[in-house]
Image: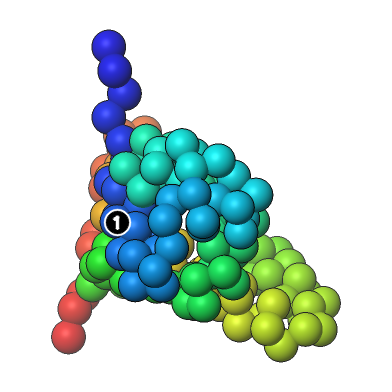
Amino acid sequence: MEDLPEPVDLVIGKALRKRRMQMGYSQGDLGVKVKLGFQQVRKYERGESSISVPKLLQFCETLQVPIGYFFKDLGHSTAPLPTLTGRDAAEMQQLFDALHNPDVRRALLELARALVRVDSVTPTVEPPVTRSESGVKRPLPEPATP
C-alpha cells in the first residue's frame, strides 16, 4: 500500500514550488543552489518527501523568505496551549539564553510558531485524565472560556 503524503509536507511543498517559481528558478536551478538533484526538489514540492529543518533553512536562505513562509497556510488553533512549568521551562529558557546570534534566535522563534501551527492541524492525544479515589479514570474538566 502506498503511503500518502502528510498534510504538512503538501503545504510546505506547495509553498516551496510557489516561491521557486516567483524567483524564476527551475527545479534544477534550485537543486544546484541547495545541493540537491531536481528529482529531490520535485519530491519535496509534491509532498512525497519531508524536508529536514536544516534543508528548510537552506531553502529559506536561497529563496529569501522567513521559515514561517512555508507554514503560513496551515492555519492555527484557537485551543489554549499548555504552559511549560518546572524543568522544561527552565531548560527552554536556558537554551534560548545560550543563543547569541540574533538571527538564530529569530529563526528559533519562527520555528516554534510554525510548529504550533503544524500541531494545530495534527490529531491531538486523548485528553488528560485523573483517577478518582475509587481508581476510575475520569477526564479532567475543560478550562472555562471567557
Q: Which residue is mark 1?
A: 14
Looking at the image, which residue is at 39% across and 69% down? 24
Q: Secondary structure at mark 1?
A: helix
Amino acid identity at mark 1: Lys
Q: For the image shown, how many numbered marks are present on the structure?
A: 1
Percent from the top left, x then y, of residue 70? 39, 65
Which is more toward the observer, 80 or 21?
A: 21
Percent from the top left, x then y, of residue 112? 51, 69
Percent from the top left, x then y, of residue 46? 32, 43
Q: Quadrant of residue 43?
A: top left
Relative placement, left or right, of 85 versus 123 is: right
Image quadrant holding the C terminus, namely bottom left
Residue 102 visible at all: yes
Looking at the image, which residue is at 65% across and 63% down? 88
Image: 27 above or below 85: above
Q: Quadrant of residue 15?
A: bottom left
